[in-house]
Every structure is written in C-alpha cells, then in structure tokens.
Image (tube, helix red, strand yellow):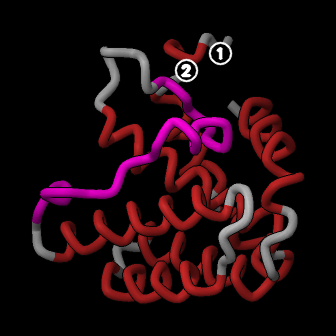
Amino acid sequence: MEKYLNGYIGRIQPVFGRVPEKAAHTIAAAFFAYKFELYPKAIRECATATGLLGDSEGMRTAKTALRIISAYAEALENSQVKPEKAERFMPADYPNLAVNLYGDSAQDPETLDIDNALILVYAIAVIASPDDEQALEEHRNYILTIIEIYKKALGIQ
C-alpha cells in the first residue's frame, strides 16, 4: 500500500505542487478535523480551502473533494451515515484520483467518492504543506487503510 500511495503522490505532484502553502495548510486542517470527527470545523476548513484554490487544472478536482468531505461532515454532524445528495467526481477528475474504479459495478460510487476525496486532500497536504509533514506522517496509516479496502480491485500485491 505504501508503494501505491507514494506512486500516487508522485503522479499528482506536478498538478498539486502549485497549491499555495496557506491553502494546503487549510486543506490539511480540513483533513484532520474530519478524521477527528470535528465536523463543524471540517465544514469551515473545507469552505475556507475551497475559496483559496483557483480554477486551474486539478484545482476543480480538489474543490470537488473538499465539497464532498464537507457534505459528509455535515451529514455525520446530523447523525446521518451519508449525505442525501453529495457532489460527485466527474470523469474529468478521474486522472487525479487514487482509486479509479468508477466503471466497476461492484463498487459503491458514493463511498468511492468520499474515500478518493480523503486520499486526495491528504496527498495535496503532503505535497504542498511542509509545516504539516510530521502530523500527516503520523496519520498515514489512516489513508493506507482506505487504500487497503480496494487492494484486490486495484490488483495490488
């Protein structure tokens, strides 16, 4: 899983290496807030980070990821398992996602969206927020566990 995650981070580095450090730090804060079930904070951080990103290549995918995380945070804050209607990744986003199994009918597309959103924001923070490097490293297993779920479908040994 470690090799797969490192490969993914390397693959998206050219696109997301341009994320401003302040935006990347806010993205990291959104990731941590969601992970620690601080849902109102996650919603705020996602909104702030979305406002700090431009509309260049990849940034639309990052904004979608943040809106998906925000929608799930809002649902969980309201004791719902998932949002009634969350934004979805589009085919144009797929090249920037870690787990592209959207054509696989065995996969739940909504779960795939939130998993991809969490992996993407984690990766962006790793790439562009050096101040959060140590904290992100401490929570790497959370992301590796998500990827592990898709190991067989991805053909990872």
Q: Secondary structure at mark 1?
A: loop
Q: Amino acid at mark 1?
A: Ile
Q: Which residue is mark 2?
A: 151
Query: What whole-number distance in Å separates the C-alpha atoms at marks 1 and 2?
Result: 5 Å
Location of the C terminus (image quadrant): top right
- Which x, y percent locates residue 26? 62, 84
Disc 1 to disc 2: CB gap under 8 Å: yes
Question: Residue at (65%, 15%) from the top-left corner?
Answer: 156
| Left/right of residue 80 with respect to residue 45 in the rendered view | left
Question: Residue at (55%, 35%) from the top-left corner?
Answer: 147
Question: Residue at (42%, 80%) from the top-left corner?
Answer: 42
Q: Quadrant of residue 1?
A: top right
Q: Amino acid at mark 2?
A: Lys
| Left/right of residue 7 with respect to residue 79 in the rendered view | right
- Which x, y percent locates residue 19? 79, 72
Q: Which residue is mark 1?
A: 156
Q: Secondary structure at mark 2?
A: helix
- The range drawn in magenta is 80-101
Q: Is 156 in front, or is 64? A: 64
- Which x, y percent locates residue 142? 54, 51
Dominant SS of magenta comes to: loop
| Left/right of residue 149 with respect to residue 93 in the rendered view | left
